[in-house]
Amino acid sequence: MPCKDTQPAAVLTSRTMPNDAIPRATSCACPKQTGLLLSGGGARAAYQVGVLKAIAALQTERAQAAGLPELGRANPFPIVVGTSAGAINATAFASAADHFQEAVARIVEVWENFRAEQVYRSDSFGVVKTGARWLTALSIGWTVRKWTRARPKSLFDNAPLSELLTKMIDPERIAGLLKTPALRALAVTVSSYTSGQHVTFYQSSQPIEPWTRSQRVAIPEHIAIDHLLASSAIPFVFPAKALSLGGHPEYFGDGSMRQLAPISPAIHLGAERILVIGAGRMQEPGGIVPKGEPAYPSLAQIAGHALSSIFLDSLSADIERLLRINRTLGLLSASERRETSLRPIEVLVISPSQRLDEIASRHVGSLPLPVRALLRGVGATDARGAALASYLLFESSYTRELIDLGVADTMARKAEVIGFLAGLSPNPVAHPAG
């Protein structure tokens, strides 16, 4: 079991603090707790799987070099936090955390062989029933009375995802693993359409005081499939999910919405070192601006831009804030640091070195024909609208390329990653890849 006095003390409530402004834990000789943060991004989360695949290979290499086979099986990330599709990956990983290599291999197996029909209805009837009617409703309103009895709730019906998650994840194993050194805590985030609050559901090996900040709360709860369906319900694309909060139901959507401090849950759960795996380029440069009069943006282009803002901007800003606090703390003397509730957090960020929407534009043709027809209607099948498609391309040709990119980006930083796994501090002012 983890050392008890590494648990953070109860969070101060007298004022609103930055995401990592948590009272300093009582010092002890235990190693620093390491967390894994997996961000959201729909099908883009295949990149995370590639990073984990590379880390598993590097962990095996370390184990062989040290003559310690158990090192390859040991989970280097006992604190796991995920949002949206990252919540699915995080929970799948946590449910098999007693064998790191097998946990990663199982996730890789799913993502390397993905088909859109495993995530949402992609047949003609399913697409017409949801997406086509939803788009029609946007254009002509509820003029047909019978539609009011069965209003389409989203662009796609993600009922197949529930079946996939049931096969992929055993939530009951998580409670058992939390009684072992393999897993210390798991958290997933959701956003309430009903109350407007951002909610973090978490399970932990030892009691951790729930925290409250402006428009965001944390609730200890056994994480189930419904939490994952809620966390991954991309706005407009997938339907909201009802969950009980405080004894009454609320409707929840993707946890990336209104997520002001994505790194915060990992820190509250005790992480002092965090590997952050993004699903888009941090500080992403703008695309090539065409000469002449620009074309008016399509619906897909606007939607893709909005989703990129939801999934990418908060994480990038939170990383910048964390590094800035680290640098400020580094300027303080030891006595001054003892007087502050802030503590430095070691962070290593791995994010795509290429634009994922450009990769998506090469694979739109692999989507089922009914889905392509629907997306063509909103402009998501051309290069300008490919950002929207990049979140929906649950097809193996695309996900495998993202996995390969995740492996390549991680191996390009091999020494840095191995150092992090070995407990060495990463450069606190290093910029993320890409």
Image (cartoon, rainbow, N blue to C red):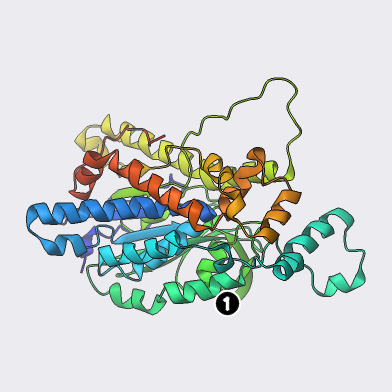
Q: Quadrant of residue 152?
A: bottom right
Query: Would residue 191 be found to the left or right of residue 268 on screen?
Result: right
Q: Which of the 4 image quadrants contains residue 68?
A: bottom left
> In this rendering, is residue 356 above or below 250?
above
Image: 94 above or below 378: below
Q: Is residue 25 visible?
A: no
Residue type at mark 1?
Gly
Residue name at image x 17 percent, y 52 percent? 61
Residue farthest to the top, as pictured: 292
- Judge left or right: residue 23 versus residue 221: left
Q: Position of residue 149 (x, y in %)?
A: 83, 75
Q: Which residue is mark 1?
A: 247
Residue drawn at x 70%, y 52% is 375
Question: Which of these two is toward me, 423 or 384?
Answer: 384
Q: Position of residue 208 (x, y in %)?
A: 35, 65
Residue at the outermost left position: 67
Q: Name the residue: 61% across, 66% down.
A: 120
